[in-house]
Image (cartoon, rainbow, N blue to C red):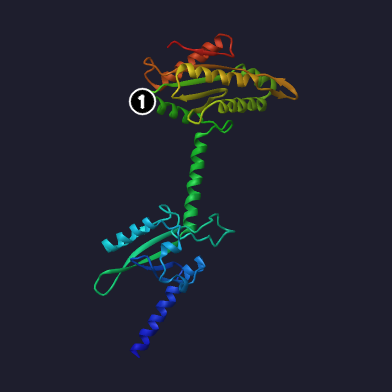
Amino acid sequence: MSNNIELKDIHWLIDMIQNIDVGLVIIDLDMKVKVWNGFMENHSGLLARHIVDRKLNELFEDIPKAWLQQKINSVYLLKNKAFTTWEQRPFVFKFKSYRPITSKAAFMYQNVTFLPLTDITGKVTQICMIIYDVTDVALNKQAFQEANKKLENLSHTDTLTQLNNQGHWRECCFREYKRHTRTQQPSSLIMLDIDFFKKVNDTYGHPFGDEVIREVANCLRKNMRETDIAGRYGGEEFTLILVDTDLKNAQLVAERIRIAVEEYDFYYLDKLVKVTISLGVAQITGNIPDYKTWIKTADLGLYIAKDSGRNQIGISDH
């Protein structure tokens, strides 16, 4: 009777290993597969009889041999568990997602636990790998992170122009000033304003005024580098930080932007409308003690440009 109970227990154990909803793989220290359960058969398409006594890294070339060997060595030497999560490595076994309609994942995200298996003398002779399907967890976390990123971008972005809003741009300006004080690399600032914008709004209406603001933002965007930082400072005023740029080159950029706006053709009810901008340029010098003074200096240049007739570039001698 005792032997029958033991045999029954073994049967239950084998049945559980085969049907449990996690992957279970046992390999020896040479990476040869000893156990390959039903989960692994179902997701790999490879039956246990085709896998056992073959080397795991040769069967699955996507698994980096050096990485797997390091895991095996760690478990063997320390006689302790080791882990890898989907955030460290999205998957160990490149199994296709079995929910292609409801899931955005092409492959199954996995967490894997490595366990030492010892013989009766306590010597580690085999390694057990337990593979958990965490695709839903991974996708939910990614969706949450993506939503947070979108919210963060929205909090930094001007809705009309998709440039940085004033608050975030001022933070960028502060950081750029600090970077300059550390590196002593040149850095310049452009402030620009749409000429007679109130008249544009009064004559053609606010929807047309919004279109003008959007297109001026596009002209700014098309004439800046990826490292430069543009923002809508308020109303019809824009700003641009030119990283690693001296005053002379900043004036060239400002002139390109001025020409781009001047040459752009706006239309209101088939009537051609021309728009110009005025710009102020300032490079950080020893006379500029902080980022607020830097902004003020560029703004003084903008005032000079407007006072001199508009549609030009002004530079303050601050």
Q: Is residue 96 above or below residue 267?
A: below
In the rendered image, the quadrant that contains the C terminus is: top left
- x and y percent of residue 252 in the render? 53, 18
Residue lying furthest bottom in this view? 1
Residue lying furthest left in this view? 121
Q: Which residue is mark 1?
A: 183
Q: Quadrant of residue 18?
A: bottom left
Q: Is residue 120 left or right of residue 222?
A: left
Total numbered badges shown on the rendered structure: 1
From the viewer's side, name the closer residue of 35 and 299. Answer: 35
Q: Is residue 295 above or below residue 36?
A: above
Q: Secondary structure at mark 1?
A: helix
- x and y percent of residue 309 in the render? 59, 9
In the rendered structure, which amino acid carries the disc numbered 1?
Thr
**Residue drawn at the location 42% of the way across and 68% of the way down:** 54
Residue lying furthest right in this view? 270
From the viewer's side, name the closer residue of 164 and 120. Answer: 120
Q: Is residue 81 left or right of residue 154?
A: left
Q: Please rate how many residues cluster around mark 1, counting C-alpha atoms within 10 Å: few if below 14, some from 14 to 19, many from 20.
A: few
- x and y percent of residue 214 in the render? 61, 28
**Residue drawn at the location 51% of the way across and 45% of the way down:** 147
Q: Is residue 183 left or right of residue 304?
A: left
Q: Is residue 87 above or below residue 45?
A: above
In the rendered image, the quadrant that contains the N terminus is: bottom left
**Residue drawn at the location 49% of the way across and 14% of the way down:** 301
Q: Quadrant of residue 220?
A: top right
**Residue drawn at the location 52% of the way across and 67% of the way down:** 45
Q: Quadrant of residue 31?
A: bottom left
- x and y percent of residue 291 in the render? 41, 22
